[in-house]
Image: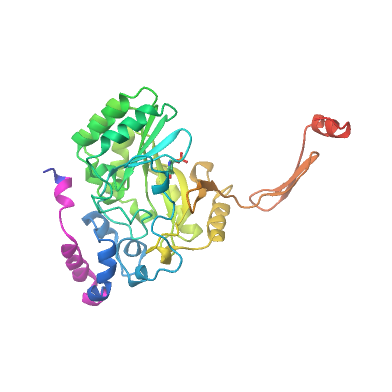
Amino acid sequence: MSEWQRAVKQDSVATLEALAERFGRDAIDVEALGPAFDSFQMRITPAALEQIKAVGDPMWNQYVPTVQELEVVDGVADSLDEDADSPVPNITHRYPDRALFLVSPVCATYCRFCTRRRKVGDPEKIPLNQFDSAFAYLREHTEIRDVILSGGDPMMLSDRRLEYLLQQLRAIPHIEIIRIGSRITSHLPERITPEFCAMVQKYHPVYMNTHFNHPDELTPAAVAALDRLSRAGVPLGCQTVLLKGVNDDPKVMLELMHRLLKARVRPYYIYMADQVAGGEHFRTTVQKGLEIIQALRGWTSGLAVPHFVIDAPGGGGKVPLLPEYVESITDDEVVFRNYEGKRFVYRQPAAALAARLHGVG
Ligand SMILES: *Cc1c(COP(=O)(O)O)cnc(C)c1O
């Protein structure tokens, strides 16, 4: 067993003990939380535990169960209807040229807001022994040029298993790029071993989309892991989830984006929190997300501004949302405001105006 595998072996009882030791026995009501544990297990790596500084802080809120998980208002289990778009086990094929491939049922640490909490942590729901039909599907569908490995966390697989997956995918000529969606650089940075970095380079282009929600997650160990990946030629992006009590504040988001860029990670998406049963207490308004984008765009490097998207409930896919910069669009002109709220006018090409006057086009 490698060092990182030993680090995730500790069970939730040990984690509860560690939490009680640091924050006091009253910090968690284990009895009241029983059903929350039952519906979605708790698992927190030592690295994630280390990031929790106080009860109810942004890290605590992400990883420690609360009774609020049991209050289901309008949340649903499969809020993105992923199972409806699954032609074979482990594959969700929703967009024309890319597919999601669930390759691991487990994560190093479980995020309480997880969209896939219905499946994650349960090896029966993300089976590891049914990859043949998934590979056959990817081989047959020559329109798929981008495969996103997800789960659970793909980086919980051994290097041997990951290499097998990468080899199988690279044997399919129409697959151009492979992406790994993983939160491991935050939760278990030691997983990014020199051996993994040497292996992954043989299968480029392999991208990694990381997942950081708060600036304090960019610990020295996480930054070092990101550096190893960059040196291995893995382009890094970050998917952040907008979460009440974690990062629903423009100042926090700005600092997060700056710290990511310093670690050579390009912010990619900010997601609206999904309407998933058990995670509703993390939801905030869409206006809050727009306010955050408005506070970033123009005020800081464009590189620091991710796309703000809602993954449409019911399986519509990701839809980008922008603050309202445009006041009016006609064939003559476009009136818009800049990041400071100043008004500007862009004249449309004269040809469009002439064509309209002459009743053609
Ligand atoms: C997010 C997602 C993708 C990838 O979308 P991009 O916008 O290309 O990052 C692909 N398939 C599914 C089902 C997804 O949810």
Q: Is residue 230 left or right of residue 191?
A: right
Q: Is residue 33 left or right of residue 176?
A: left
Q: Is residue 38 left or right of residue 260?
A: left
Q: Tell me the quarter of the image containing the N terminus.
A: top left
Residue furthest right in the image = 358
What span is in magenta? 4-27
Residue 76 lies in quadrant: bottom left
Q: Residue at x 34, y 35 (%)?
A: 230
* Residue 118, percent from left and from top: 33, 56
Q: Is 122 placed above or below 181 here?
A: below
Q: Is residue 168 left or right of residue 21?
A: right
Residue 53: within the magenta? Answer: no
* Residue 169, percent from left and from top: 31, 29
Q: Residue at x 78, y 42 (%)?
A: 330
Marker count (numbered) = 0
Residue 204 lies in quadrant: top left
* Residue 117, percent from left and from top: 33, 56
Residue furthest left in the image = 1
* Residue nearest the observer in this picture, 234 or 32: 32
Q: Can I make out residue 233 in this image?
A: no
Q: Can I make out residue 41 in this image?
A: yes
* Residue nearest the observer in this picture, 69 or 265: 69
Residue 17: within the magenta? Answer: yes
Residue 165 lies in quadrant: top left
Q: Residue at x 30, y 23 (%)?
A: 171
Q: Is 79 placed above or below 269 here?
A: below
Secondary structure mostly seen in magenta is helix
Q: Is 353 placed above or below 279 here?
A: above
